[in-house]
Image (tube, helix red, strand yellow):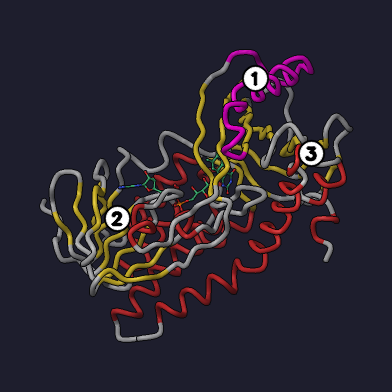
Amino acid sequence: MMLSALPDVLVVGLGPAGSMAAAQAARAGLDVVAIERKQRGGAPVQCAEFVPNMVAREFGDLGPVAAQPVARMLSFVEHAAADIKENFPGAMIDRALFDTILAERAEAAGADCRFTTALSAVAADGTVRLADGTHVRPRIVIGADGPRSRIGRAIGARNRDFVETRQITAALLEAHDGTDIFLSAEIEGGYGWLFPRAGVANIGLGLRPEARHRLKPLLTSLHGKLIAEGRVGREVLSVTGGPIPVGGPVSPRGGLGETAVLLAGDAAGLTNPVTGAGISAALQSGALAGAAAAEWLGGDENALTDYGEELEDLFGASLSRALKRRRGVLAAYRSGGKPRPEDLRQGWVGYPEYWAA
Ligand SMILES: Cc1cc2nc3c(=O)[nH]c(=O)nc-3n(C[C@H](O)[C@H](O)[C@H](O)COP(=O)(O)OP(=O)(O)OC[C@H]3O[C@@H](n4cnc5c(N)ncnc54)[C@H](O)[C@@H]3O)c2cc1C
């Protein structure tokens, strides 16, 4: 079936933000087209797959996607023993299934969801060209197209600062119920992680782009250390990675001719610049963007401005603290220096120093 060339809403990207936006707008009775360049939601996975339990507020019961529960966070600074933060409840999820379920809900709500359908250009009048040559002229575009959003770029609101990541999966030889975080001056502008996922472990590393050539050797070294400790297997079962926006929020709304534009999730720079976590913010902002689109098309002139204010209320304080802490750690590298263990602790959410004034 041909897709509607003049829909009320075009959602670009069917990750968590886009699927939530499409579902919300379709439930409000709008004509919604949603496009995704991948063949299916969330695959291949580019994620460490941890979510805090509060994500259930947007997603509902995590049971169907939960791989295993997480109870605590262990932070290792340089070679010191772990500092353990208890009461850190969350879940390791099957991210591909999580995204697939969200996209199915958007379809069930009435959105016309098209996979293997990429946006290839956005014109200044809001006309969107798809890779197959089709043109779509929506009344609102919701850019939920991830860290390097084409929609964000079209309205001059693009993410400029990233962490580059590499992650492998290996067998987990000892059951574990915590997320392990490895902080070191060597891991510039990022951290290493081991997240247990029932029988396997996601082991990864993020670095500032200037140091990206060190991703592979540093991850090999972290993997080697974990093998030597008898915690994980030698065989690499899969490899993934991708950029994480860490520059903080961009302006989440704009216009292209008469077409209004909203950004949600990573496209809006809502990922936490310290932890890299963005699933929860993507779900929340996507739902709000879909609702704002419906209100605006229903005649509420302030709905789009309100959307920007809601994002600021929800995420402004935590993102600005994270940005400040990240800058603090990065400042230590200037003039050939490096962060001390106390700088690394102040720059990580697992320590009270991070939360101090
Ligand atoms: C290695 C890694 C580990 C991470 N681990 C965690 C974690 O453990 N917990 C957590 O909360 N967050 C984590 N994150 C961040 C999290 O994955 C993102 O914040 C989250 O996916 C954002 O959702 P989104 O819907 O905004 O964007 P995305 O999930 O990136 O979805 C955007 C979608 O848009 C599509 N798209 C892009 N361009 C186009 C186009 N031109 N045409 C059509 N479709 C397009 C993409 O294919 C994609 O499916 C991690 C990120 C990385 C890279």
What residue sits 59% from the left and 74% below the top? 313
Q: Which residue is mark 3?
A: 338
Please name the residue shown 61% across and 43% down the image.
Answer: 50
Q: Nearer the viewer, residue 153 or 51?
A: 153
210 within the magenta span? yes
- Going by the numbered disc 2, the residue's amino acid type is Glu
Residue flagged by tag 3: what amino acid is it? Answer: Lys
Magenta region: 208-235
Q: Amino acid at mark 1?
A: Thr
Q: Nearer the viewer, residue 58 or 36?
A: 36
Mark 3 vs 1: CB contact within 8 A: no
Q: Is residue 334 above or below residue 232?
A: below
Q: Are marks 1 and 2 in contact (CB under 8 Å)?
A: no
Q: Position of residue 77 (x, y in %)?
A: 83, 37
Real-space Cα distance between discs 3 and 2?
50 Å
Q: Residue at x 57, y 27 (%)?
A: 213
Give the residue number, with chain letter if any, for mark 2: 107
Determine the secondary structure under disc 3. loop
State the separation of the CA atoms marked 1 and 2. 41 Å
Residue at the image point whose x is 77% and y is 35% from the top: 185
Horizontal relation, residue 35 to residue 215: left or right = left
Mark 1 / mark 2, whichever is N-terminal:
2
Q: Secondary structure at mark 1?
A: helix
